[in-house]
Image (cartoon, grey):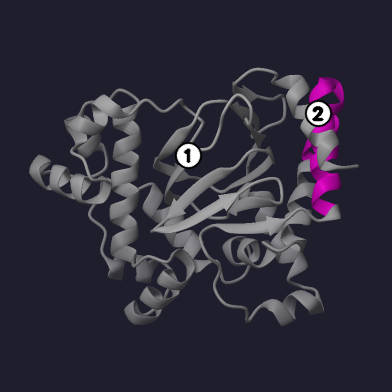
Amino acid sequence: MSKDLIKQLIERQLPEAGLLDTPLDGVQLFRVTTPIPCVPAVYDPTLVAIVSGVKEAVLDGHHHAYDSNKYMLCPMTMPVEAGTPLASEENPLVGVMISLDAKVMRELALEMETSSSAARESGAAAPHGLSLAGWDTGFTQALQRLLELIDSPADATVLAAGRLRELYYAVLKGEAGGAAKRAFGVGNEIARTIDFLSTRLNEPITVDDMASQVGMSRAVFHRRFKEATKMSPIQFVKSMRLNNAAMKIAGGKTVSEAAWDVGYTSSSQFSREFKRMYGQSPRQWSHDAQVPVGMM
């Protein structure tokens, strides 16, 4: 079993540029052959594995470039800038994107935390919002076994859930396991706060509101949140709102509609904060944004 075989599996399904929904729940294949600059995006809990080319993600100014040597784990919903600035016909970006099932990840993380080794890891530092991890043998084997089901829908119906669970387990045991356990296991207060925020972007939310959701003092919550996301809670909320608005504008909504959807009641404030974040006004962005859906 090897990354070469995984690459062959993906390229057989997707010989041309595009994004392919597979029969496996939450599993998409992608191939990008033109450069796409890093643009605002929101990552839900996701795993991205690259078999060719380089993908980039920027979180609060911190650049994460990863290729076939490292897979990327985003264990919490995060506002990022993402793109494929080096993709070309000669060197396409090829890989797989897997949405993480929070229920299954929680079950596995909690099971693993009952072991003595997991208990010793519980005092580790808070994880970053994005983590890169090497392709170890367990991860490589589990990913290949999962993707082999694409060719057999009948087998996929019976086996897909088990093989996804096997892949999740490999992630939890790998280099990104600490980040995954803190997001889905005991001590997942910050991830729960982000889930709470993600469904209330159009509502006024204070740091005290967030801290009370997880039973922390304001000071402790602020410190823990920044350790996990590299942003203060207020910075995070603003980035989530503006990134969501930028995606809505790129998807065809008017500037006013996008601003209202993410909680801005003042169009001048929205325009001012948008330009400060992205270096151009929302209207300029609406003219320039031409990013293929799903490629960010």
When the figure is inspected, residue 238 is found, relative to residue 142, above or below; the finding is below
Q: Residue at x 13, y 47 (%)?
A: 272
Are the residues flagged by discs 1 and 2 in contact, CB closer than 8 Å?
no
Residue that extends furthest to the front in the rendered view of this protein = 90
Q: Is residue 131 left or right of residue 289?
A: right
Q: Residues within 10 Å of mark 1 (few under 14, many from 20)?
A: many
Residue drawn at x 49%, y 48% is 57
Residue 161 is one of the magenta-drawn residues: yes
Q: Is 182 left, or right, of 288 in this rendering?
A: right
Residue 213 position in % (x across, y down): 40, 66
Q: Is residue 268 left or right of residue 119?
A: left
* Residue 273 in picture, x, y percent from top left: 18, 50
What stretch of residues is rendered in magenta? 138-163
Q: For mark 1, what is the residue?
A: 83
Q: Quadrant of residue 37?
A: top left
Measuring 64% from the left and 17% from the top, which residue is drawn there? Answer: 16
Q: Residues within 10 Å of mark 2 (few under 14, many from 20)?
A: few
Residue type of the residue flagged with mark 1? Gly
Residue at (30, 22) in percent of width and height: 252
Which residue is label 2 attached to?
Answer: 8
SS assignment at label 1:
strand
